[in-house]
Structures are given as structure tokens and as C-alpha cells.
Image (cartoon, rainbow, N blue to C red):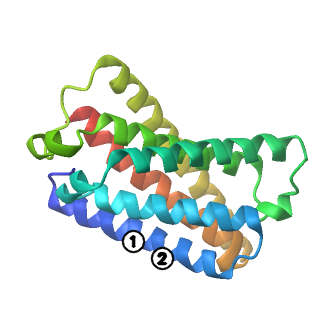
Amino acid sequence: MLSDPVLQWVLTLTFSATAAYSALRLVNDRKPFLIIGDGLHLVMSLAMIAMCWPWWAVIPALPQLLVFIAGTMWFALVAVLQSQRRIRRASVGGHSPWHQVAHAIMMLAMVWMILAMPSGTDSAAHTHHHGGLDLWAALTGVAITAAMATAGVIFLVELIRCVRGRTTWLGHTGDVASGTLMSFGMAAMCWPMITG
């Protein structure tokens, strides 16, 4: 997907770190809402690693779309239920509904990338070039990229507060650090698709 080898490796390492963290959380978490979220983030991180490289084109798009559409709906539903106080904050790792919204946007960004990127036999010709997005794809891409960058800044501010407060790493602080990496990494992945 990306033509710049430095960006390919930086994003591969970034999403390898978030995948490792999600896998660690998946093993340690016991609450159903957290387990589902960890699983979705693990799959998302692995898909983002694949998207950095030309061989992403051989991975079928439909299963990815179904997983990330379901992920978008899942986090949106959890955000709504949590804001209505039907889900306790402790059930979702102490996070606020805003975290669920941020995760829903991440999943939606995955859907956008899969739909906007050439796939299958078309990808080989366009692996290193993403120009020619239609107006709708370009505008929604700008909105999603802006949302990811904004979420990254908010996560970063929260991370700084967590580090100063010395909260538990494998918990809220770790989740916020992972959210920061995911948000900025996804924004960095989306931007070349819009401007390429």
C-alpha cells in the first residue's frame, strides 16, 4: 500500500506494538466487553500491518469489511449503552463513552481504507499510487483522517495525565498509550491515500 519504505517500517513497528499489547490484554482480561474489544483491536492491528505492504492485495476484502463493520457497530453500541448507564464504566476498563466512540471511528476508518484502496487484481497496478479517489472517498477520507488525528491528540493528553498520575500500566494507561499509537498510525496511513 505504501511506497515509502521508512513509513512502511515505522507503521509496521507501530502496529506490531499495538498488536502485541492487544494480545497481552486479550490473555489477561476477564470481562466480556474487554475481551471483544481486545480481539477487534488485535485483528485491526494485524490488518494495518498487512496494509503497509503490497501483499495486502491477496487478502480478501469481504471478510475484512464484515469484521470492521461489525466492530464499528459494536463500539458504537457500547458507547450508546454506556452513555445511557446500562453498562458500568468498570465493565469497559474504566473508560468513558468517548473511548468507545474513538474505537468505533477506528473501525470505521478500516472500512473506509478497505473500500478506498484497490483490491484483488486491481491492486498490483495501484499498490504505490492512491491518486484518483472520487470526491466522496476523498472527503470522507479527510474527515476520518482528521477524526483519527484529533483522537490521537486527546489520547496523548490523557496519556500524559496518566503518566503523571502513575496509574497502572496494563490497564487504563496502557490502553490510552495504545489508543494514541493506533490513532496517529491510522491517520498516517490514511493521509497518503488522500494525497497520493
Q: Nearer the viewer, residue 130 or 46?
A: 46
Examine the image and state in which quarter residue 118 appears: top left
Residue 10: image location, x then y, percent: 29, 65
Q: Circles 1 and 2: CB distance less than 8 Å? A: yes
Q: Quadrant of the C terminus?
A: top left
Say if residue 149 shows up in the picture.
no
Q: Nearer the viewer, residue 67 or 3?
A: 67
Residue 6: image location, x then y, percent: 19, 62
Residue 140: image location, x then y, percent: 42, 27
Residue 44: image location, x then y, percent: 46, 58
Residue ID at (32%, 40%):
191
Alpha carbons under labels 1 and 2: distance apart: 6 Å
The residue pinned by badge 1 equals: 16
Tell me if 140 is positioned left or right of 135 in this view. Answer: right
The residue pinned by badge 2 equals: 20
- Dot 2, crowdedness within 10 Å: few (<14), some or many (≥20)? some
Secondary structure of residue under mark 2: helix
| Tally of numbered tags | 2
Tell me if 122 is positioned left or right of 171 in this view. Answer: left
Q: Would you place residue 184 above or below residue 173 in this image? A: above
